[in-house]
Image (tube, rainbow, N blue to C red):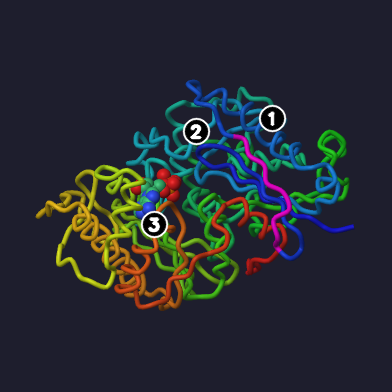
Amino acid sequence: MVNFYIGIDFGTSGARSITINPEGTVVAETQFPFPPLTDSSEYVSLWKTALFTVIQEIPVNVRRQIQRIVINGTSATVLLCDPQGIPVDSPILYNDSRGATVLELLKKISPPDHCVISATSSLAKLIWWLTVKKIDIQQQLGCLYFLHQADWLAFLLHGKLGISDYHNSLKLGYDVENFAYPHWLINSLKSLINLDRLKLPDVVSPGTPIATITPEIAEQLQLPKTCKVCAGTTDSIAAFLASGANVPGEAVTSLGSTLVLKLLSKTPVNNIKYGIYSHRLGDLWLTGGASNTGGAVLRQFFSDLELETFSRQINPNNNSHLHYYPLIKKGERFPINNPELLPTLEPRPDNPVEFLQGLLESMAKIEAQGYQLLQQLGATPLTQVYTAGGGAQNSTWTAIRQRYLNAPIVQPIHTEAAYGSALLALKKVKNEA
Ligand code: ADP
């Protein structure tokens, strides 16, 4: 009998499961792409179907030996549920900016520069429900539970409502340094509602076993009765964990549509001006920022095939002497905070290979500048950079980036968020504070 561990990733385009053995080797993978939906009320049943499908499609001989499950959700996708766990309104998705209407109130109640001050934060969504939608708490049966997507999905398996992890709860305002909801948050919510009737989740460390699955779920999904569901995490932290980075100074650069940097640090770094905030990771901090430059700009000028063929013609050791700031539209936050910053894509050489070299070099400089900024603001010095995302396969770009970064670039074996969650289930991640 071997013990297996499942990580389940709920991303923006679908759900995916990865099952690993105690050595971290992948033994099964399943996925469920989300169809396009027009009505957000359909999400709840879709997520439930996706969760059950990705588990049921794991070969039954593997499924019968699953010890622990961790689910990561999309950060700041939230639900409001009755005591039976049934959502009383459609979930609000990660990128839904209806919270812009309560931004002024958020600024008044929260400390300056707090990461909850954003139209898409979980707290903005809760306050929108209470003050704009005016969900009438008195009329509900019992009380209401505010949950993140990962909390609700885990509830479907273990049946315990009202538990979350400190990754998902950061943008709700939970104080991850002191492991408590801060007074400013509790007092402001009290002024809006009777707190006996609104249950904020109890927050535990990601990966903490919460409960065994219910007997009905064990039977339905053919999982062992002893299988435990553990507290989850967010999709981007799960993707970071997948890389295997776990020592201060190690970082993951994601070269996707945008350029996202994450650096593991002994000290937290927070700076709202640059959109930098820190997640707790055991006794370490995961800090980082997101630039608007990235693959989306490359896609404006080149197909993926052109990117591959032209990149092969670039000598990465030559300097193009082209200085661009590649953006698809005006405005940058990190590592330069300037909402008015215009894209710089001139002068444009006739030869597309030279133009591509200039773009790749310029993005490499922005990446290096980003890590410098994080370190200037107090993060642990960079020692090693893993790369994820569509641009990670481009070895020419890696060689160019290596010229500007003062740390070796390493290709991670795994980049899937589901793998990071599976590591959390296996407890291969230092996450105990
Ligand atoms: P996201 O999930 O952020 O949308 P992906 O991680 O899937 O993005 O990466 C897609 C991006 O990767 C595209 O914007 C594309 O321009 C870029 N890309 C694809 N192939 C290459 C390549 N060979 N070199 C550099 N960038 C590439």
Q: Residue furthest left?
A: 347
| Left or right, residue 270 beside residue 413 | left
Identify the residue shown where x is 68% and y is 46%.
Answer: 29
User: How many other residues sit within 10 Å of disc 3, few (<14), some (14-19) or many (≥20)?
Assistant: many
Give the labeled residue for mark 2.
Answer: 92
Identify the residue shown where x is 31% and y is 55%.
Answer: 291
Magenta residues, start to end: 24-32
Give the labeled residue for mark 3.
Answer: 260
Q: Position of residue 178 (x, y in %)?
A: 56, 65
SS at mark 3?
A: strand
> Which image quarter holds the C terminus?
bottom right
Residue 109 appearing in the image: no
Marks 2 and 3: in contact by CB < 8 Å?
A: no
Look at label 2 and name its amino acid. Ile
Number of numbered discs on residues: 3
- The residue lying toward the viewer, choosing from 326 and 390, is 390
Q: Is residue 198 above or below residue 292?
A: above
CA–CA distance in space, label 3 to label 1: 42 Å
Give the labeled residue for mark 1.
Answer: 142
User: How many other residues sit within 10 Å of disc 1, few (<14), some (14-19) or many (≥20)?
Assistant: few
Q: Position of residue 220 (x, y in %)?
A: 83, 33
User: How many other residues sit within 10 Å of disc 2, few (<14), some (14-19) or many (≥20)?
Assistant: many
Look at label 3 and name its amino acid. Val
SS at mark 1?
A: loop
SS at mark 2?
A: loop
